[in-house]
Image: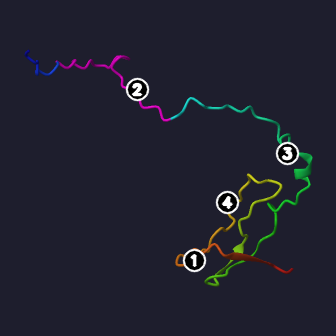
Amino acid sequence: MSANFQPKPRPVPQFPPTPQTIIKPPRFYSNNIFIVPRSKPGTHIPESDTTKECVCERPEAIVICRKCGSELLGRVQMTCPAHPRKMCLMDQRECPSSTCRSIALMEVTLED
């Protein structure tokens, strides 16, 4: 019983590559992709949710860090009960001090 330890000849690459020689990238996506049709704005929100108080357009206030005491003019980031998926990007969620970065912030409203 003799074993053949000779390497198999490799195919010579063709240039330009033909569709048979192109390597397909790996699939990172599953086959369970759901396409949800778009709906009209406000149709998915029940009537009881539309009466909730919106905090998206609240006025600016003084934001104070309870840990280090730094202050700035702005708003603390919070989830709106009427619009839970909306996020105001200029709202603060942590202390602006580079040495603190605490999330213990409080908002003090400005008096006119």
**Mark 1 belongs to which amino acid?**
Ser
Q: Please identify the quarter of the rendering in which residue 7 is found.
A: top left
Placement of 106 over or under 54, stated as above or below: below
**Disc number at residue 97?**
1
Q: How many numbered marks does the figure carry?
A: 4
How many angstroms separate mark 3 from mark 2 (CA)? 43 Å
How many angstroms separate mark 4 from mark 2 (CA)? 39 Å
Residue shown at 85%/81% (left/top)?
A: 111
Q: Please identify the quarter of the rendering in which residue 88 is found.
A: bottom right
Range shown magenta? 9-28
Element type where label 2 sits in the image: loop
Residue shown at 7%/16% (left/top)?
A: 2
Residues marked 3 and 2 touching at CB (< 8 Å) = no
How many angstroms separate mark 1 from mark 4 (CA)? 18 Å
Residues marked 2 and 1 touching at CB (< 8 Å) = no
Please tell me whether the stretch drawn in magenta is mainly helix, strand or loop. Answer: loop
The residue that mark 3 highlights is 45
In front: mark 3 or mark 1?
3
**Mark 4 belongs to which amino acid?**
Leu
How many angstroms separate mark 4 from mark 3 (CA)? 23 Å
Label located before the other in sequence (4 or 2): 2
The residue that mark 4 highlights is 89
The residue that mark 2 highlights is 24
